[in-house]
């Protein structure tokens, strides 16, 4: 128990009542939710007002890459608040340039200019705008089984059921199938087949849409919310070649996969690919203050050397957010957080999840890298029928709800999405914490097994 969290159920009830009175929650039927009142958090854990401790295997919304309340980042925010709490984006501010330099140094290739936003969706909106202005074209190709954010263009680009209710169908978006061998859209049996067929399908899509109308292709380097689907070797470099062939801007969305999650600073490094634009957010400062952005290649930046970029945000490069980013990146270097994520994935989390898959009939596939893993839960390992239907987004579903409740009862806060649970702890999680999480998952999967 952290020293500052003292169980106080009455206070918890008051916090919850105040929340239910006035807070309108994301992605929820307001009358049907019962949000947990959180009393405090530290490292990989958080506490409720009843004194229950939860190991956070969700990293918030996959963003607390260095865990909660890291003292160095908290201090940096406090110091910045005392020094210069805010200043408008048109001015040069020391901490803003420093954050941009540290990010640019870590992004691959020549992605050396940073446009700051307040989060991931705004980063995607601006990347698309940059691509459209750079090419003079309007269409954007995005993948089914993707998530790019909840603002208007970003939700149109999103290729999962969260789009359905608000998709205008009019943002110049064309969707295609990206590779996913376990549920192959191409009926492929090997990674190589999946890769070749996915690239051929993408090129066909471009041919029939009209290459001269397509501004950008956007992909999550490793699609996150839609299932942590590591692309087969050769796919992303193949997309890079296709983009070059047709003069299409290649955007990689690393809002979730970036900043250590996959065991590298950016997931693109695993695949030897450099996009023209890279979107980031979340882990850039562990989400302590909202921050996101677009890392821009020389080629795209040159378009806006003498021509104004027509876009901006009041809080772009907010000093508190940038101070948090500078401190977070420093902590990640000093404490070897990226290396830790890689090692934990290879030695504890990956092997541990695979071992669970062997014993539990409900686990169809384990996939991932670093601290970025998914368990695809199934009714039947042979047929791979998902434990709940794919369109169960946002709807209560009994098997996954029972799985989630069992995990929580065992002290683990799980990420649950449709028929999947993701194991996405902080990048500085310890081996002991992961083992504790695996034990809780083991118990929760026994409940999921009842539905197979
Ligand atoms: N892109 C990806 C890949 C994401 O995972 C997310 C958020 N889950 C977003 C964009 C949107 O980011 P935000 O919620 O900060 O707008």
Image (cartoon, rainbow, N blue to C red):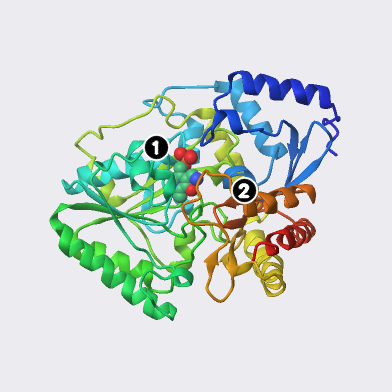
Disc on res. 65: 2
Q: Earlier along the polypeptide chain: callout 1 or callout 2? A: 2
Residue 255, visible in the rendered structure: no
x then y, percent, for residue 99: 50, 40
Residue at image position (62%, 48%) is 65
Q: Is residue 265 left or right of residue 408?
A: left
x then y, percent, for residue 143: 35, 57
Residue at image position (68%, 45%) is 67
x then y, percent, for residue 331: 65, 46
Disc on res. 122: 1
Instruction: Give the SS element for disc 1.
Output: helix
Residue 230, visible in the rendered structure: yes
Distance between the alpha carbons at the discs numbered 1 and 2: 20 Å
Above or below for 158 versus 233: above
Q: Is residue 441 left or right of residue 267?
A: right
Q: From the Cβ of disc 1, is ligand 1 less than 8 Å away?
A: yes
Disc on res. 142: none
Dot 1 and dot 2 residues touching (CB under 8 Å): no
Q: Is residue 198 left or right of residue 227?
A: left
Residue at image position (21%, 67%) is 204
Residue at image position (86%, 33%) is 3
Q: Residues within 10 Å of mark 1 (few under 14, many from 20)?
A: many
- Choose top left, top right, bottom left or bottom right for residue 312: top left
């Amino acid at each position: 128990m952290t020293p500052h969290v003292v169980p106080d159920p009455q206070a918890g009830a008051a916090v919850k009542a105040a929340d239910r009175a006035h807070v309108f929650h994301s992605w929820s039927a307001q009358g049907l939710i019962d949000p947990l009142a959180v009393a405090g958090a530290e490292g990989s854990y958080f506490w409720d007002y009843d004194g229950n401790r939860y190991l956070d295997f969700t990293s918030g919304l996959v963003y607390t890459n260095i865990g909660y309340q890291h003292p160095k980042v908290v201090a940096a925010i406090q110091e910045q608040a005392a020094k210069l709490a805010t200043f408008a984006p048109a001015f040069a501010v020391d901490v803003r340039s420093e954050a941009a330099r540290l990010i640019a140094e870590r992004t691959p290739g020549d992605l050396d200019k940073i446009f700051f936003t307040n989060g991931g969706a705004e980063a995607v909106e601006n990347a698309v705008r940059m691509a459209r202005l750079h090419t003079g074209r309007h269409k954007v190709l995005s993948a089914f089984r993707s998530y790019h954010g909840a603002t208007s263009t970003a939700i149109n680009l999103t290729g999962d059921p969260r789009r359905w209710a608000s998709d205008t169908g009019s943002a110049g978006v064309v969707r295609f199938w990206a590779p996913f061998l376990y549920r192959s859209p191409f009926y492929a049996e090997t990674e190589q087949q999946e890769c070749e067929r996915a690239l051929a399908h993408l090129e066909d899509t471009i041919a029939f849409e009209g290459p001269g109308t397509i501004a950008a292709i956007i992909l999550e380097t490793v699609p996150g919310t839609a299932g942590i689907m590591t692309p087969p070797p050769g796919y992303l470099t193949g997309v890079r070649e296709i983009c070059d062939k047709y003069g299409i801007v290649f955007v990689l969305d690393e809002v979730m996969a970036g900043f250590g999650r996959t065991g590298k600073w950016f997931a693109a490094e695993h695949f030897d690919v450099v996009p023209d634009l890279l979107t980031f957010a979340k882990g850039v400062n562990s989400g302590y203050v909202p921050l996101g952005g677009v890392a821009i290649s020389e080629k795209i930046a040159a378009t806006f050397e003498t021509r104004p970029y027509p876009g901006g945000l009041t809080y772009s490069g907010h000093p508190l957010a940038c101070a948090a980013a500078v401190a977070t990146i420093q902590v990640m270097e000093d404490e070897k957080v990226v290396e830790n994520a890689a090692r934990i994935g290879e030695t504890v989390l990956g092997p541990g999840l695979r071992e669970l898959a062997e014993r539990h009939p409900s686990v169809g596939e384990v996939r991932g890298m670093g601290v970025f893993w998914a368990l695809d839960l199934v009714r039947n390992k042979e047929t791979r029928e998902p434990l709940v239907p794919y369109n169960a987004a946002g709807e209560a579903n009994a098997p996954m709800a029972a799985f989630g409740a069992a995990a929580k009862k065992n002290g683990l806060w799980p990420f649950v999405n449709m028929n999947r649970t993701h194991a996405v702890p902080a990048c500085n999680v310890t081996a002991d914490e992961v083992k504790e999480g695996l034990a809780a998952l083991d118990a929760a999967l026994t409940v999921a097994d009842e539905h197979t």
